[in-house]
C-alpha cells in the first residue's frame, strides 16, 4: 500500500480507538505492551487529532514525578482546548495513581474541546495487575504510530 492509504488505515484505527474522546467520555486510558510502544502511541494520539504535541500537553511520568506536575497538566486540560497526555502512568506510586483515577473518574472538568489520554505500560498480565489505573479504569490497547506514520505526520504538519 502507498503512504496515503497507510495513513488512512492508521487514522481510521485511531479514530475507532479514540471515539469516546469525541463522544461522552473525553478521557481514555491506552495500554502499551512494551517500552518501545509508549512514544509511538502518544504520537498516534496526536496524529489522529491532526496535530503535533506541544510541551505543555504531554507529561512523561517518572517514579519521582511530583503530583503537582500531574495536577498542573490536568488543570491545563480544564482551561485550554487541546489533546493532553499523561504517559508512563505506571511509574507513579500507588497514591498518585489513585489520585489520577479519581480525577479521570469525574474530578476533571475538561474544556469544551479538550481530551485527555493516559498511557500505561503493561508488558504482561502481572504488570497490568499492579497498575491501579488499569484495575480501576476501562482501557484500550494502544495502537503505536509506525515509522512511516511518523514521517507522514511530520510531512503533513510542515
Image (spheres, rainbow, N blue to C red):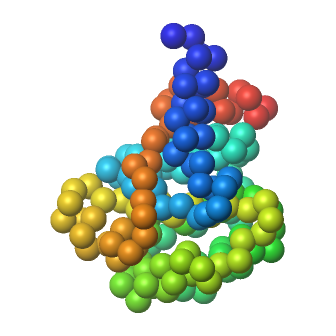
Q: Picture quarter containing residue 132?
A: bottom left
Residue drawn at (50%, 30%) of the image: 147
Q: Picture quarter containing residue 43?
A: top right
Q: Residue furthest front?
A: 24
Residue drawn at (60%, 33%) of the image: 11
The answer to whether residue 51 of the structure is visible from this angle is: yes
Residue drawn at (73%, 62%) of the image: 114
Name the spot of residue 89 as percent of width and height, x first.
44, 69
User: Is 153 located above or below residue 52 in the figure?
Assistant: above
Q: Looking at the figure, which quarter contains the C terminus?
A: top right
Q: Nearer the viewer, residue 104 or 56?
A: 104
Q: Nearer the viewer, residue 91 or 114?
A: 114
Q: Residue furthest left?
A: 126
Name the spot of residue 121 as percent of width and height, x first.
36, 59
Name the spot of residue 104 as percent of width and height, x first.
55, 75
Q: Picture quarter containing residue 107?
A: bottom right
Name the spot of residue 61 as percent of width and height, x first.
48, 70
The answer to whether residue 76 of the structure is visible from this angle is: no
Amino acid at each position: 500500500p502507498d503512504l496515503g492509504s497507510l495513513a488512512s488505515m492508521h487514522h481510521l484505527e485511531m479514530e475507532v480507538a479514540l471515539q469516546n474522546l469525541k463522544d461522552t467520555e473525553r478521557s481514555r486510558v491506552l495500554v502499551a505492551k512494551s517500552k518501545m510502544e509508549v512514544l509511538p502511541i502518544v504520537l498516534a494520539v496526536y496524529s489522529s487529532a491532526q496535530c503535533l504535541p506541544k510541551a505543555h500537553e504531554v507529561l512523561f511520568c517518572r517514579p519521582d514525578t511530583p503530583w503537582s506536575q500531574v495536577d498542573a497538566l490536568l488543570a491545563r486540560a480544564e482551561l485550554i482546548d487541546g489533546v493532553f497526555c499523561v504517559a508512563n502512568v505506571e511509574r507513579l506510586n500507588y497514591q498518585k495513581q489513585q489520585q489520577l483515577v479519581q480525577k479521570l473518574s469525574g474530578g476533571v472538568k475538561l474544556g469544551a474541546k479538550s481530551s485527555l489520554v493516559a498511557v500505561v505500560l503493561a508488558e504482561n498480565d502481572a504488570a497490568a495487575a499492579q497498575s491501579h489505573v488499569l484495575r480501576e479504569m476501562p482501557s484500550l490497547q494502544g495502537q503505536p504510530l509506525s515509522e512511516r506514520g511518523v514521517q507522514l505526520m511530520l510531512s503533513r504538519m510542515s
